[in-house]
Image (cartoon, helix red, strand yellow):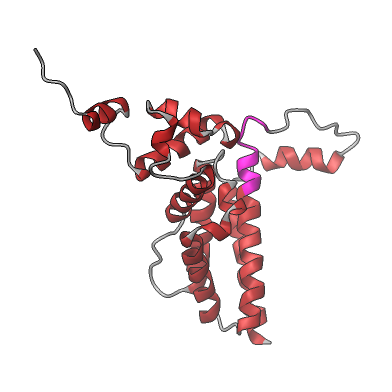
Amino acid sequence: MLPKKSSSARRRDKAGNGALTPARIVEEAIGLADKEGLEALTTRRLARHLGVEAMALYHHFDSKDALLDAMTERLESQARPQLKGTDWRAHLHAIALAQVETAIAHAQTAPLMTSRRGASAAVFANNEDILSCLLRAGLDERQRVAWVRIFVAFVNGLALYLTAIRTPQRASHVIDPKLYPLTARAVVAGGKVGYRETLDEGVATIVRGIQNAAKR
């Protein structure tokens, strides 16, 4: 007769590969939300996905809000690039690119990166990187406050736009060129313009604005 497994061993078996840890829960929650959307992410749905009882999740996260905060922290950490050299212009571009590419890779969960910005230490670290660039650009404190807002608004707006057109919920109706001729033409032209071109142009425009502000 085979020896009986301990309760902890049974829980590990039931949870799939290895023990149920906060890191694994967050990883699986992001993966599930990426597939089915944030609206479909409930503790019961996630628990079934992990092969555990819903109460098992509360040993690691005392609420869904706490889980969403942890997911935001993970995404924002992924979106923080390793900055090399001292060129603040190159650093701003790298920060924008990392944020947008993370959002594209996680189109369904990317809204967390804008809706829960105050909940993540990684957000503060990213903001610190941006403010450091603005300080090195020669801006005073009031100017840095204004331009960090401008930069974050551009990056978040581009990220949300790009993720919106990649999700199943995007609008599928055809634009009437007789009613909206310029919009219809822009949609056609937009298919030939990659997101990198938009990002490059946007960051370059912001850099020029920062340089002009530093001269005042």
Which residue shows up at 46% across the image and 74% down it? Answer: 87
The image quarter containing residue 168 is: top right
Question: Residue 165: in sight, yes or no?
Answer: yes
Image coordinates of residue 77 in percent, x first then y, are 43, 55
Name the residue located 57 percent from the left edge and 57 percent from the top edge.
Answer: 117
Relative to residue 207, is residue 45 depicted above or below? above
| Whole-percent x, y for residue 4 in the image | 15, 21
* Location of residue 8 (image quadrant): top left
Q: Position of residue 177 (x, y in %)?
A: 85, 34
Quick one: quadrant of the N terminus?
top left
> Seen from this angle, which residue lies furthest right?
179
Total label count?
A: 0
The image quarter containing residue 204 is bottom right
Q: Is residue 147 magenta?
A: no
Please give the name of the residue rendered at 38% of the width and 42% of the height, measured from the top-left corner: 59
Identify the residue shown where x is 68% and y is 33%: 170
Q: Nearer the viewer, residue 136 or 126?
A: 126
Q: Quadrant of the C terminus?
A: bottom right
The foreground one among 110 and 119 is 119
| Magenta-colored span | 160-169
Measured from the top left, where is residue 61 in percent x and y?
44, 45
